[in-house]
Amino acid sequence: MNEISKLPTSGSGFTPKPVWSLDNTVCLKTLFMNNTTKNAFLDAKNMLLLMRQLQRLDEERRSNTRLDELLTEVEKANGYSSKVPLVNQAAFLAMAYSTLVWLRESYFKCADVQATLEKRVAWIFDEPTLTVKLGKDAKVIDKDHPTELVRRVRNALGHASVEIKDQTFRFSDKNPSNKNDWACIEMSWETLGKLCEGVIFAGNDLLYPAESGRAKP
């Protein structure tokens, strides 16, 4: 995953300015001062940190004999006969669930978050591994409507409608009330990881603009 500016830790505290959402229904300060939402957001950021730590350990293992021995010992104790990458399908899936599902729906419905999220994830449509197929009644998913991609992937994760392939994930979401309202989205593990980063940084842009301003899109 791309290197992005360091995120504030939980110790930084949440002191957002009381900015009202575009539809005047959700106050950003109220949204993030809610303990459930705040803790879920911190969990998502911690998951991003964990993924980066696992990636670093994977890299270090190649040249650190002692680290390789320790990880091999754990792998054998769990029935594995060969090395298992620490950053694997399960890790990316756990990251996606923590970021897209564990964060409550109120986060994604906040107009302030949606506006920032559009800027943070629109570039994902330039990723060559991303494919999107839609039913005739489904809402548009493209570079001008990136939040709909997030919603569909979130729904698929929430309903365990995810197919794990060799190098990609396939997300399927269907509207039970309309057979023509469906989406099938496929992307690589890395692209999913970048999508999760975008979701986290959208909130971070609003809460910590000074730090997020240095982050790469």
Image: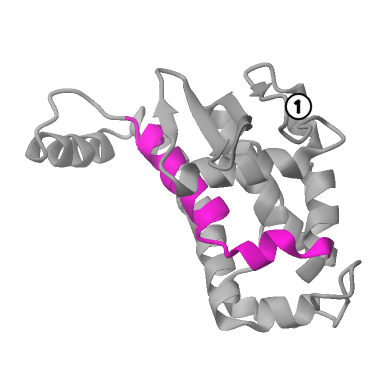
Q: Is residue 24 visible?
A: yes
Classify residue 200 as left or right of residue 157: right
Extent of the magenta region: 85-111
Q: Quadrant of residue 82?
A: top left
Classify residue 119 as left or right of residue 110: right
What residue is at 53 percent from the left and 68 percent from the top? Answer: 40
Looking at this view, is 181 or 162 the one in front? 181
| Label 1 sits on residue | 125
Q: Quadrant of residue 15?
A: bottom right
Residue 145 location (% of width, % of height): 82, 38
Residue 187 location (% of width, % of height): 58, 25
Main SS, magenta region, reads: helix
Badge 1: residue crowd in 10 Å (few <14, some 14–19, many ≥20): some
Classify residue 181 as left or right of residue 211: left
Tell me the quarter of the image containing the N terminus: top right
Is-magenta flag for residue 168?
no
Q: Is residue 88 visible?
A: no
What residue is at 18 percent from the left and 34 percent from the top? Answer: 72
Is 143 placed above or below 202 here?
above
Tell me the quarter of the image containing the C terminus: top right
Amino acid type at image mark 1: Phe
